[in-house]
Image: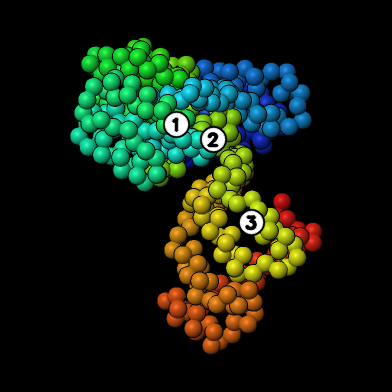
Amino acid sequence: MFESLGDRLQNAIHKMKGYGKITEENIGDMMREIRLALLEADVNYQVVKEFTNNVKQKALGEEVQRSLKPGELFVKIVKDELTELLGGESAPLNTSGHPAILMLVGLQGSGKTTTIGKLANFLRKKHNKKPLLVAGDVYRPAAIDQLKQIGKQLGIEVYEEGKKDPVQIAQNALAYAKEKGYDYILIDTAGRLHIDEELMRELLRLEQVIKPQEILLVIDSMMGQDAINVIQGFHNQLSLTGVILTKLDGDTRGGVALSVRHLTNVPIKLVGVSEKLDGLEAFDPERMAGRILGMGDILSIVEKAEEVIDQEEAMNAAKKMKNGKFDLEDFLNQMKQIKKLGPLENLLKLLPGAKKMGLTNINIDPKQLSHVEAIILSMTPKERRNPEIIKASRKTRIAKGCGLSVQEVNRLLEQFEQMKKMMKQMTNGNMKLPF
């Protein structure tokens, strides 16, 4: 997300770092580049104008002129202004009800039904509580079946009554959720190809009768500036509490995210970052600003790891590494844990300086990881615990067992030995870091 915008902004800021001090002339050059970068990213013109004016005024302030490193302060000013533009502070979901009621609204094609499944999964993992999905889109063909399929994939119950009155369905679902002890009730609603009176009347009835804690508008981030009109159209009729931006992983421009809060005052609460059912993230303006400027997002990596990695198993592996007893069995277990974090290239992009280190264009073939897994699984338990006993005849048998070549078996064993040496150096404190 934001790849082209991030590249342009980072290049402009890099030039500023080379200046001994900030002057009216060089700040003017920087502002022109930043203005173009934002406009090309499809950020609203008025937003761009205000943003660049704010940065320029702060950059020409006395504090910056007296600074020994004006470039660093310029980076801070741009990051602070980007953070403010994106909403300033994160806006968490209101889940105070018993059950908490979350209603999703939006136009057809915005990804609403898939997003409600992702949201249920997100809430279940984050709070370890029970969500109930409610099929309230009774007009779109196959909408109910689609939601039931998503619920089946996730192991989350879907409440549906076919093509009855959506308000009545929601009321009945709420009574059912209270009876069965559900913590969240997530209501899917009908969309239209455009905002119309009939759609709004139905949504208003739902709002008035159900009184949800959250009314979340699902918007396709690839809509561009049209999304602002859609948000304002819904917000004028409903009490929107937040926006969920979908397909942010596919939109390299990202102008909608930079314009939404400033123009509508509706916070972005969540963003869709992949097509998978775990591809939903809480939106944090400061972290997003850091990602755009190439500063990375270590906290997101840590949070992802905490969600999926077994802490006790990780501690045991760390002890084995320290004692030099880390074997291929441990390596296989750790690899399975890492795979739970999602595509590794996405994690690499979150590291500070990923662009400079050439980590943003890396494509890791999932087949390679599958090959490593297949090789290790073709070994006997004794071979996994003692890789040094794997000689020519054993290598041939392992290669046949996994359908790969002896060369690939050799490559894995060599890489594992190199990794063990590196671990030993790290635990002994003898490893020289490249920075």
Question: How far apart are the two marked residues, 2 and 1, measured between alpha carbons?
Answer: 13 Å
Question: How far apart are the two marked residues, 3 and 1, measured between alpha carbons?
Answer: 31 Å
**Mark 1 closeness class: few <14, some 14–19, many ≥20 residues within 10 Å:** some
Q: Name the residue beneath numbered marker 3.
A: 313
Whether residue 425 appears in this view of the structure is yes
The residue lying toward the viewer, choosing from 266 and 46, is 266
* Left or right, 350 with reference to 185: right
Question: How far apart are the two marked residues, 3 and 2, measured between alpha carbons?
Answer: 22 Å
Q: Secondary structure at mark 1?
A: loop
Residue drawn 53% across the image and 38% down it:
128
The residue lying toward the viewer, choosing from 390 and 264, is 390
The location of residue 47, given as percent across then percent down, is 47, 19
Q: Along the polypeptide, which appears first: circle 3 or circle 1? A: 1
Circle 1: residue type:
Tyr
Q: Quadrant of residue 319?
A: bottom right
Q: Name the residue beneath numbered marker 1.
A: 182
Residue drawn 29% across the image and 24% down it:
169
Q: Nearer the viewer, mark 3 or mark 1?
A: 1
Q: Name the residue beneath numbered marker 2.
A: 127
* Left or right, 237 with reference to 389: left
Q: Nearer the viewer, mark 2 or mark 1?
A: 1
